[in-house]
Amino acid sequence: MPARLPRAARSLCLLAAAALLSACAATVQRPAGVPVEPVAIDGDVRQIVLVVDGSDAARASEDWSEFRALWDEAMRHSASAAGLQGSVRDSRPAALDPPGVVVALRVDSYRYVSTGARYGLGVMTGNAHIKASAQFVQMPGGRVVATRSYDTTSSAWQGIFAPMTVKQVQAITDRIVAEVSGGG
């Protein structure tokens, strides 16, 4: 007959598992006390084009190209889940077909930490973070319909399961798509 764990031990194991799993998700913080108006888009939106740029310091980082490449897959995934086309371009397009929204994202600062580095080196890798702002431009027309700030961070307290840069990028693109779709 297999030995049964005492009730307290089972409860502790379940609590630990729940804590580890909850630490895996990245959350996007907004500035406190700033009211957020919905992104007001007139007409049909069938695609979102993300244009990722960075401050001089961000673009000068040795891992900028690797960091920037993360946005393409994340945007395609987020947009596809919402039934939209999603892409990342190097510059703002003059027109979109089908109609949609161009999101000009400016990364003010970031710290790239890969999931592999976090698993391999643990909390010694430091904390990943992204601080960015976005301008939502309706196309056709070129009218700026909203601006947003996005901040994400990980914490050493979350251990090896803290949301690293890949999950933080995905969380930001999920939020962008939700706002364009009216759910943000």
Image (tube, grey):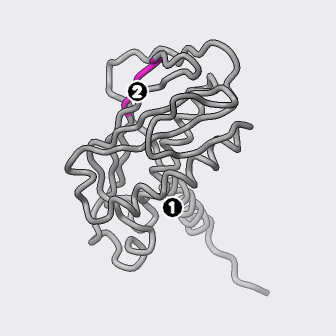
- Name the residue carrying label 2: 148
Q: Residue at x 38, y 74 (%)?
A: 117
Q: Is residue 72 magenta?
A: no
Q: Quadrant of the N terminus?
A: bottom right
Q: CA distance from mark 2 to mark 1?
A: 30 Å
Task: Give the overall secondary structure of the magenta segment.
Answer: strand
Amino acid at the residue labelled 2: Arg
- Vertical relation: 182 (above or below) 126: above
166 displayed left or right of 83: left
Amino acid at the residue labelled 1: Leu
Mark found first going from the N terminus, 2 or 1: 1
State the image quarter where residue 6 is shown.
bottom right
Q: Residue at x 40, y 27 (%)?
A: 148
- Of all residues, the one furthest to the right in this rendering is 1
Highlighted magenta segment, given as a residue range: 144-149
Q: Residue at x 54, y 52 (%)?
A: 72
Q: Residue at x 30, y 51 (%)?
A: 110
Q: Is residue 145 magenta?
A: yes
- Name the residue carrying label 1: 20
Q: Position of residue 49 (x, y in %)?
A: 55, 37
- Vertical relation: 133 (above or below) 16: above
Q: Position of residue 47 (x, y in %)?
A: 65, 34
